[in-house]
Amino acid sequence: MEDNSKVCLFCKRNEQEVPLLAVDFKSNHYWICPQHMPTLIHNPTQLEGMLPGAEDLQAG
Ligand SMILES: [Zn+2]
């Protein structure tokens, strides 16, 4: 069975198009491409609506 969920959570590209990095967050598994890894690090609030709980990441 093909895993259609294995796409960058930001741009939705799959592993055939870009390398995907595994992200574990709140006991869930996500994938993100290198292009959007900086977004996850520096602007995680942009992931609101894509990554459940992303709003919690802004505190630091
Ligand atoms: Zn991406």
Image (cartoon, rainbow, N blue to C red):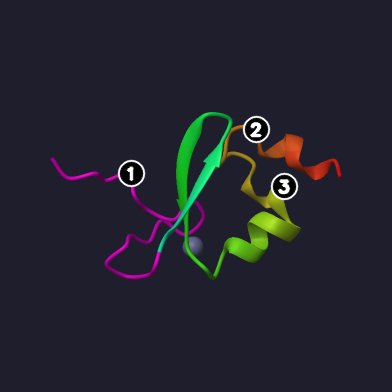
Percent across and percent down for residue 52 are: 58, 33
Percent across and percent down for residue 60 are: 86, 44
Category of crowding for the residue at label 2, using alpha-carbon neighbours closer than 10 angstroms: few (below 14), some (14–19), many (at least 20): some
Tag 1: residue type? Ser
Q: Badge 2 is on which residue?
A: 53
Category of crowding for the residue at label 3, using alpha-carbon neighbours closer than 10 angstroms: few (below 14), some (14–19), many (at least 20): some
Horizontal side of residue 26 vs 13, given as left or right:
right
Percent across and percent down for residue 33 are: 48, 63
Tag 3: residue type? Thr
First reached walking from the N terminus: tag 1 or tag 3:
1
Q: Badge 3 is on which residue?
A: 45
Q: Badge 1 is on which residue?
A: 5
Residue that extends furthest to the top in the rendered view of this protein: 27
Q: Quadrant of residue 26?
A: top right
Q: Is residue 39 magenta?
A: no
Q: Distance of mark 1 from mark 3, alpha carbons?
A: 21 Å
- Give the magenta-colored segment's residue range: 1-19
Percent across and percent down for residue 49 are: 59, 39
First reached walking from the N terminus: tag 2 or tag 1:
1
Tag 2: residue type? Gly
Residue at the image position 54 percent from the left and 70 percent from the top: 35
Q: Distance of mark 2 from mark 1, alpha carbons?
A: 18 Å
Q: Distance of mark 3 from mark 2, alpha carbons?
A: 9 Å
Q: Is residue 2 magenta?
A: yes
User: Dot 3: what SS?
Assistant: helix
**Main structural element of the magenta stretch: helix, strand or loop?**
loop
Horizontal side of residue 55 vs 9, given as left or right:
right
Mark seen at residue 51 = none
In the depicted structure, whether residue 53 falls above or below residue 42: above
Residue that extends furthest to the right in the rendered view of this protein: 60
